[in-house]
Amino acid sequence: MLVAALGAAWAGAPSSDPPAPDAVFDWFAYTGRDVAFEGTVPPGSFRNPVLAGFHADPSVVAARGKFYLVNSSFTFFPGIPVFQSDDLVHWTQIGNVIERPSQLDLDGLSVSRGIFAPAISYHDGTFYVITTAVDSGGNFIATATDPAGPWSDPIWLKSIEGIDPSLFFDDDGKVYVINNDAPEGTPRYEGHRAIWMQQIDLATRTPFGPRKVLIDGGVEPAKQPIWIEGPHLYKRDGWYYLSAAEGGTGPQHSQVVLRSRQVWGPYQPNPDNPILTQRDLPPGRALPITNAGHADLVQGPDESWWAVFLASRNYAGVHYNTGRETYLLPVTWTDGWPRILAHGKAIPYVVPGPAFMAGEQDQAPNTGNFSWRDDFDEPTLGRAWMQVRMPKAPWFDLRKQPGCLTIHPLAAGLDTLGNPSFLARRQQHLAFESSTALALPPPGTAAGIAAFQNERFWYFLGVRRTGAHAEVFLEKRGGDAPATVVASHRLQPVNERVQLKMQADGGAYGFGYDDGHGLQWLVQDADGTLLSTEVAGGFVGAMIGPYARDERPRPSSGKDL
């Protein structure tokens, strides 16, 4: 688990500064209340998304009688979560490909850089994950015999540029790398990309031979399609099927497919492309699911085909705070072509499940409305928690005060490009509430709950001591300007403890406190759209969790913007 791994990585780490006073949290709770998740799911059906909240760029493989799935993690650590399922519907996270700080350096990167679009495959007893560490090393492969880990250190593929690589194992034993890169020559327009392929020797992890373009631009080059990416190659009934995302990861996102009798092509596009999109639906529809694409196909034990893909749930037309999520739909084959969803049809929130689906209908805590609570009474931290970038020093502890989370605050703030002392879990609902109880921190430390989209867009509901008094405050950053205090109030704590609460409904966020005299709202209807991708940019979703900051007067240890 995470604490044990980090403890080993940090053993003997020197510290030149005296530690800041600790922040101690009793528990952390989260409850989702989305309208789209109300009601019961009929027997034999499942709820979409299957992984709610920031679970972008899914890739899936069937192996050893089970299914395994990975997602992009960008600059969050541990990185590249690995999920396991018996039925494609109920998923359990079993590990992470990047679980040791020594595997990758993400310092200095904005949140939406780092790990892009990992692809998982299985061959001859070994699991392979191939991906791109954007601005932090390029393309690499990691391997494991157990998908729960440990995974190898990155094996860098220095000769392959671009992003979104995947592996294809052909029947004749040859293995290929397929990925997105700039086209040959000068791009004709912004977003002009190509899909390339090259053979690779897995024994030496070395690409060799010619590297050739399989798709230049997209399925209709004359229309100047943008951002062809996320390619996967499959073989069925003697045909090679090349599937890729097209149109960018926003409202024009789609999935297209081409096929050939030869692995090197030429590939002919499906005359009925795209095989998945939501761009042709009315924007004002109720409970919209948008941005659908970046699919990966897998075959079940009954020979049925299924697709996992990303999409987003919007509010107020264009905003989504929950990021790009993982969805599941059946794949139908007609005249030798796959289709995920008919043109003009909305992605359903409830779907008839696979014939091999487990009988249990509950998919919590991955989707649906549920309540989740961490009492910090385990010796290791649960897999729901992540950090921003790689830790360089141990700053959380579950053993110092058993039954509590102790944070040793760092000076690096949420607006730095380092590793702030912030434990993050995904916001999985448009409407939710989250709360925590903590001891009033000693002077020099501020502690509370953060809602974080990236280093330029966040809220921090905190408490601190000011002289002989204590105060609760709400701090906000919403762009290039420095963070500001939105509101503050002097506390009258009954027993040196305080509860903090955050709640949201779409773009309206509320921030409150209870110092022993009942819940009081510090700010209501705060602008939560600054936590949306539409405003903040990037590729992740909002994250929430305990945060503590060293406020003693000394130079910051973080890499500031």
Image (cartoon, grey):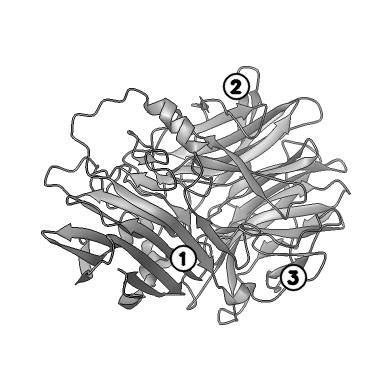
Q: CA distance from mark 2 to mark 1?
A: 39 Å
| Side (left or right) of 66 relative to 336 | left
- Of tags 2 and 3, which is closer to the observer? 3
Q: Nearer the viewer, residue 457 or 543?
A: 543
Q: Which residue is mark 1?
A: 321
Point out residue 196 in the picture as x, y percentages from the top left corner. 60, 38
Q: CA distance from mark 1 to mark 3?
A: 25 Å
Point out residue 27 in the picture as x, y percentages from the top left corner. 44, 55
Residue at (60% x, 68% y) in the render: 369
Residue at (68% x, 62% y) in the render: 276
Question: Badge 2: few (under 14), some or many (20 or more) residues near its Cα, within 10 Å?
Answer: few
Can residue 189 be seen here?
no
Say which amino acid is labelled 1.
Asn
Q: Secondary structure at mark 1?
A: loop
Q: Which residue is mark 3?
A: 41
Q: Which residue is mark 2?
A: 205
Say which amino acid is labelled 3.
Val
Quick check: 14 above or below 57? Answer: above
Point out residue 221 in the picture as x, y percentages from the top left corner. 60, 55
* Nearest to N terminus: mark 2 or mark 3: 3
Say which amino acid is labelled 2.
Arg
Q: Are marks 2 and 1 in contact (CB under 8 Å)?
A: no
- Of tags 1 and 3, which is closer to the observer? 3
* Nearest to N terminus: mark 1 or mark 3: 3
Quick check: 533 above or below 411? Answer: below
* Nearest to N terminus: mark 2 or mark 1: 2
Question: Badge 1: few (under 14), some or many (20 or more) residues near its Cα, within 10 Å?
Answer: many
Q: CA distance from mark 2 to mark 3?
A: 46 Å
Q: Secondary structure at mark 3?
A: loop
Residue at (49% x, 37% y) in the render: 2
Question: Badge 3: few (under 14), some or many (20 or more) residues near its Cα, within 10 Å?
Answer: some
Point out residue 257 in the picture as x, y percentages from the top left corner. 71, 53
